[in-house]
Image: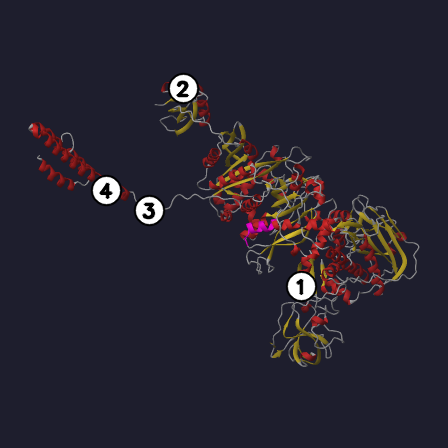
């Protein structure tokens, strides 16, 4: 083939190339060792010496030109093949996959963790004491003396004359103060037991005790701390209200109400029209309790509070029966995904 | 504590509405659990008089013309009652009236005549005869002749009153009385408290025969007795009966009513003994002998023991101190002489007796909360005052006061204004403190910031400055507390410790694997052990028992977690749930010795439970394996034996050489006994794992440490062996691994059985990974190791290499 023929024919042929196979044929015909361009190069031996240089240049030009055309076509073909592959591999993205049920934490754990998060941010440690306690830790050293009327407030499950299922997490206060001297900031979460069972009571339930012992701790600090707590747990708009109550281990003792988070305090069914919901009890630690743990009450004072986890869970999630929390029905549990 | 609004008004001038009183009581620490308006739903029922009456021919009805004064002079009302007569004053419910029974009165046709109202019976107004005489007659309630025409029955019957139900905290037994509440109301309203009339006159009569002896002064530190005579067996006046009925007592007779009235008003349980029945006119207070008996007022014979304090005469018991009188000394129609008792019995003793005998009474309920000696004195004085003013008895001069010697002086304490304000965190001015404490009946002397306080004798709860701080802030107002945040406290770090944060991570990991966390009650039933096929002599049956369980089902502390888990699964199946994965991380309780002498070991167990079409033994094993891998641990498994698990599908789980638990399929016998539909039982397979988390918690690594990679090349080789079916995979892997230190990991990648292999054979193919810390593992080295492996498997199991 002459240079001219190559020029015209290879252009025409290349235009017809559709796929990688045809492109390979084209390459074999023109660009391989036995291809037309190489043949032209071989023809140099018949060219007079003085023309050899020009001839060689011309052939090289042709070669580069064909190679250029080829490369261009190759990219085009590859692109086309890739497109075809993509077209072939289209999937229906809406097809279902194998269903895997995701589990989640129990609602009581969720609330417990939320509360811990708030107080850890304020510098609290977490302590977990035993569930089986003795009279001394559960009652006596908390200033609940033998004939104290408040022993009636908490119907106790006894194991022996002395051992019992703890009726509150407050014995944790004693254990912490025995082991550690002020400054103390600690939370004591845990299960507690009372012989009581109805829509709002379960013989086992969970509490979270909070204890702060340091210099100059006052009732104002209790309110300040609990203000922060209810804002974090319920809403920024939540307010607290203290009102007098009685616990042997605190004096003064208070019930702490939070402004109703459903109606904002206007009064609704949740808050029984009062605008306030009782969420926890607390107070200034009774000096006798500090002294019972070898802490000098003339130097240090403390605040303590106890939160009923079930109550918070029921209020926050709108659960109407405490029993649901211990029934553990999947349909119930799966609603508490974080 | 139930208190009538009008009763409170006897002792303090209340100038606020009941609703506002409720708010103020609440702020002072007395939560009002309910206010009941006594005249609720008795509206437009008025006093009427029948002016004319005729029989309605052919019916049982009477046609009455009723004059209701300014409410209309001629109401035409038909009635079926036959006790009405012309001139009778009757309660007339006019058109639009409401009755407590729910009736609303409309004009209505009776036979062929319209009736414009209804004449009422006592029952229709929900009254009994003690509230109004004749309220119990079968027919219309006939009113007294002086009943004012047209007056609302609500007013005529004194039902325009409110009953407060107030919750009293345990530190304020003094407020378990009308006067206790009245004193608080007086304090917050800043009004004087007007004490009840305690006055009476003794007439000089003396009964020389009477003696009172207290043998147990510790349990009965104060005993007052007063002899009264010429006792009349009579009804008490209407006002007293009504008050008693309103707060939940029955009217019985004047003598008994007085004791109940004093209990409610003063808060002192009283007792009246018929002196005639007291052998030797004596009272002896002593403990019961074991086995001694007494028939109490409720006509039941009580068998007593030495914990029970008794009131006796010279020969027999006549009452259970502070709980209930004996039937033998009861006030009767024939009673003429009475010994009044007002005493203090220790709350603990009364509680034990009352609970021990299962005998509840108003007196016991009151004593259990604690009585002070001042109230003992007030109670007696008030009872004598009432007996005298109501003409129930004559008051003699024979009175007795047996005392344990406690002072009758007020206790005095000193507190400083600063001490009080340091508790509160605000600055309450001294003059406010003084005003508040005086209003609460303290005697106060203030000097240089120090308050000397004489405490009212009924305030046993007041001991130091913290108590005074509470009294002050209660009245000063909790709304004056300003939120602060530990201005002077040291900064603390806080946060979860390593164990606590790991526990949370463990739970969250399991959630990500499709497990739901559950929480179950730690108490369970002994029958669980039978249901779970636990042998009679097994350790699991050594349990911590509750002395006072609510039910048998919650009478022991669990020693295994599986029953709680299985019950949850059972319930879920019953509720129609088909697939479930659960975990619980909670304690079991293992006694160190029985009977219990020290607290048992509380061991935290991680329990997993699965059930559903996708679940099987290996799915649960996969969870455990993934869990181990996630925590950079290696678990290994050996065939195990657990009474409640499938004998062929149970494995013990080991980690770092320690047995940490077991898992497997729940036995079919247990599933068969479950309370689920029979059809479901055959298909139900439940899988349980119990892992000792207290052991595991110490096996988690405490810190991450990086070891540089050696850069040496390892080598892999696959082998396939023909081996006896009975040889377990784990045993084979252990044997291979033991062959050479270069072997780092052996993984089964194929297992099959076939006829061609022979009925008692199986084929297992393993990938053996080799590595060395000292250099590359060459093919030659690998060949040598594999030869050892082949030899070992041949020798130990008769295994043959397959091509």
The relative height of residue A238 versus residue A147 in the rendered view (above or below) is: below
Chain of residue at mark 3:
A
Q: Position of residue A41 (x, y in %)?
A: 12, 30
Q: Secondary structure at mark 2?
A: helix
The relative height of residue B191 versus residue B95 in the rendered view (above or below) is: above
Tag 3 residue: A92
Residue A80 disc label = 4
Q: Based on the displayed image, in which of its 4 quarters is residue B194 positioned?
A: bottom right
Question: Which numbered disc flags the more N-terminal residue, 3 or 4?
Answer: 4
Q: Residues within 10 Å of mark 4 (few under 14, many from 20)?
A: some
CA separation in Å, label 2 and label 4: 53 Å
Asked whether B633 or B601 is in front, the reply is: B633
> Contact (CB < 8 A) between labels 3 and 1?
no
In the image, is B477 to the left or to the right of B401? Answer: left
CA separation in Å, label 1 and label 4: 87 Å
Question: Residue visible at 76% across and 76% down?
Answer: B146
Q: Position of residue B733 (x, y in %)?
A: 44, 25
Q: Residues within 10 Å of mark 1 (few under 14, many from 20)?
A: few
Asked whether B134 or B60 is in front, the reply is: B134
Tag 2 residue: B785
Chain of residue at mark 1:
B
In the image, is B744 to the left or to the right of B114? Answer: left
Residue B115 disc label = none
Chain of residue at mark 4:
A
Q: Residues within 10 Å of mark 3 (few under 14, many from 20)?
A: few
Q: Which quarter of the rendered picture does the N terminus of chain A lie within?
A: top left
Q: Position of residue B491 (x, y in %)?
A: 60, 42
Specify the segment rendered in magenta.
A225-236
As drawn, the residue found furthest toward the front would be A50
Tag 1 residue: B20
Q: Secondary structure at mark 3?
A: loop
In the image, is B687 to the left or to the right of B758? Answer: right
């Amino acid at each position: 083939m002459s240079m001219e023929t190559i020029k015209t024919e290879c252009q025409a042929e290349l235009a017809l190339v559709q796929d990688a196979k045809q492109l390979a044929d084209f390459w074999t015909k023109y660009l391989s060792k036995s291809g037309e361009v190489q043949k032209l190069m071989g023809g140099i031996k018949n060219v007079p010496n003085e023309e050899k240089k020009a001839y060689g240049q011309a052939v090289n030009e042709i070669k580069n030109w064909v190679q250029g055309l080829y490369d261009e076509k190759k990219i085009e073909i590859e692109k086309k093949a890739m497109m075809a592959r993509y077209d072939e591999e289209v999937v229906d993205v809406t097809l279902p996959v194998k269903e895997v049920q995701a589990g989640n934490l129990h609602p009581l754990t969720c609330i417990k963790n939320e509360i811990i998060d708030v107080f850890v941010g304020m510098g609290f440690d977490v302590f977990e004491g035993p569930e089986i306690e003795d009279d001394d830790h559960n009652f006596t050293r908390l200033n609940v003396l033998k004939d104290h009327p408040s022993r009636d407030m908490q119907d106790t499950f006894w194991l022996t004359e002395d051992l019992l299922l703890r009726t509150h997490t407050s014995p944790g206060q004693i254990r912490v103060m025995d082991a550690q001297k002020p400054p103390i900031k600690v939370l004591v979460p845990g299960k507690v037991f009372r012989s009581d069972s109805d829509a709002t009571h379960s013989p086992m339930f969970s509490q979270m005790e909070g204890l702060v012992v340091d210099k100059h701790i006052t009732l104002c600090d209790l309110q300040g701390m609990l203000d922060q707590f209810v804002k974090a747990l319920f809403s920024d708009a939540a307010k607290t209200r203290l009102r007098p109550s009685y616990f042997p281990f605190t004096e003064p003792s208070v019930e702490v109400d939070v402004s109703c988070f459903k109606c904002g305090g206007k009064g609704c069914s949740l808050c029984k029209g009062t605008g306030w919901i009782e969420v926890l009890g607390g107070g200034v630690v009774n000096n006798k309790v500090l002294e019972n743990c070898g802490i000098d009450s003339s130097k240090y004072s403390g605040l303590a509070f106890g939160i009923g986890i079930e109550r918070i869970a029921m209020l926050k999630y709108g659960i109407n029966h405490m029993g649901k929390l211990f029934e553990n029905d999947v349909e119930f549990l799966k609603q508490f995904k974080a | 504590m139930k208190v009538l609004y009008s009763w409170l008004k006897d002792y303090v001038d209340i100038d606020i509405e009941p609703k506002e009183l409720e708010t103020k009581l609440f702020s002072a620490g007395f939560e009002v659990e309910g206010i009941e308006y006594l005249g609720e739903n008795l509206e437009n029922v008025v006093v009427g008089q029948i002016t004319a009456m005729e029989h309605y021919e052919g019916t049982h009805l009477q046609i009455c013309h009723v004059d209701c004064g300014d409410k209309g002079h001629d109401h035409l009302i038909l009635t079926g009652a036959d006790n009405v007569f012309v001139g009778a004053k009757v309660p007339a419910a006019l058109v639009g009236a409401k009755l407590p029974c729910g009736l609303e009165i409309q004009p209505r046709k009776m036979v062929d005549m319209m009736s414009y109202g209804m004449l009422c019976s006592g029952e229709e107004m929900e009254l009994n005869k003690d509230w109004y005489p004749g309220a119990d007659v079968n027919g219309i309630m006939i009113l007294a002749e002086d009943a004012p025409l047209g007056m609302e029955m609500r007013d005529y019957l004194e039902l325009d009153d409110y009953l407060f139900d107030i919750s009293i905290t345990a530190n304020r037994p003094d407020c378990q009385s009308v006067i206790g509440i009245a004193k608080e109301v007086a304090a917050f309203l800043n009004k004087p408290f007007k004490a009840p009339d305690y006055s009476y006159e003794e007439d000089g009569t003396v009964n020389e025969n009477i003696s009172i002896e207290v043998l147990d002064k510790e349990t009965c530190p104060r005993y007052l007795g007063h002899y009264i005579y010429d006792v009349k067996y009579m009804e008490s006046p209407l006002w007293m009966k009504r008050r008693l009925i309103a707060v939940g007592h029955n009217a019985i007779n004047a003598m008994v009513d007085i004791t109940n009235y004093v209990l409610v008003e003063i808060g002192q349980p009283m007792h009246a003994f018929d002196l005639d029945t007291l052998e030797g006119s004596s009272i002896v207070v002593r403990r019961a002998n074991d086995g001694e008996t007494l028939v109490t007022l409720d006509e039941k014979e009580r068998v007593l023991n030495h914990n029970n304090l008794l009131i006796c005469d010279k020969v027999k018991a006549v009452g259970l101190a502070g709980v209930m009188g004996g039937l033998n000394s009861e006030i009767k129609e024939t009673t003429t002489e009475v010994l009044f008792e007002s005493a203090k019995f220790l709350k603990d003793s009364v509680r034990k007796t009352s609970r021990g005998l299962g005998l509840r009474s108003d007196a016991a309920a009151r004593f259990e909360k604690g009585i002070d000696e001042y109230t003992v004195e007030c109670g007696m004085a008030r009872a004598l005052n009432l007996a005298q003013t109501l003409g129930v008895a004559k008051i003699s001069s024979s009175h007795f006061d047996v005392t344990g010697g406690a002072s009758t002086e007020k206790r005095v304490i000193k507190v400083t204004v600063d001490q009080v304000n340091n508790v509160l965190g605000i600055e309450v001015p001294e003059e406010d403190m003084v005003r508040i404490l005086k209003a609460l009946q303290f005697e106060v002397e203030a000097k240089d910031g120090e308050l000397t306080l004489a405490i009212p004798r009924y305030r046993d709860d007041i001991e130091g400055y913290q108590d005074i701080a509470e009294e002050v802030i209660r009245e000063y107002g909790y709304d004056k507390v300003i939120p602060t945040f530990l201005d002077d406290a040291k900064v603390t770090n806080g946060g979860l410790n390593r164990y606590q944060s790991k526990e949370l991570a463990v739970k969250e990991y399991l959630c990500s694997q499709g497990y739901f966390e559950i929480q179950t009650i730690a108490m369970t039933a002994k029958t669980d052990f039978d249901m779970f096929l636990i042998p009679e002599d097994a350790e699991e049956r050594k349990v911590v028992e509750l002395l006072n369980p609510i039910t048998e089902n919650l009478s022991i502390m669990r020693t295994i977690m599986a029953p709680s888990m299985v019950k949850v699964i059972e319930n879920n199946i019953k509720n129609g749930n088909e697939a479930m994965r659960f975990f619980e991380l909670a304690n079991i309780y293992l006694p160190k010795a029985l009977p219990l002498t020290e607290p048992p070991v509380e061991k935290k167990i991680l329990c997993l439970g699965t059930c559903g079409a996708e679940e099987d033994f290996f799915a649960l094993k996969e969870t455990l394996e993934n869990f181990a891998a996630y925590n950079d641990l290696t678990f290994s498994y050996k065939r195990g034996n657990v009474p409640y698990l499938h004998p062929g599908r149970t494995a013990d789980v080991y980690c770092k050489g320690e047995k940490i638990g077991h898992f497997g399929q729940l036995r079919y016998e247990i599933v068969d006994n479950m309370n689920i539909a029979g059809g479901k039982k055959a298909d139900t397979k439940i899988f349980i794992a119990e892992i000792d988390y207290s052991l595991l918690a110490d096996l988690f690594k405490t810190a991450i440490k990086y070891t540089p990679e050696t850069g040496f090349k390892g080598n892999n080789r696959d082998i396939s062996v023909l081996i006896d079916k009975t040889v377990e995979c784990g045993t084979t892997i252990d044997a291979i691994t033991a062959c050479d230190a270069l072997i780092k990991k052996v993984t089964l990648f194929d297992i099959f059985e076939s006829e061609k292999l022979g009925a008692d054979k199986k084929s297992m193919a393993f990938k053996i990974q080799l590595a060395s810390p000292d250099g590359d593992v060459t093919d030659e080295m690998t060949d040598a190791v594999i030869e050892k492996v082949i030899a070992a498997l041949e020798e130990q199991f008769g295994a043959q290499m397959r091509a």
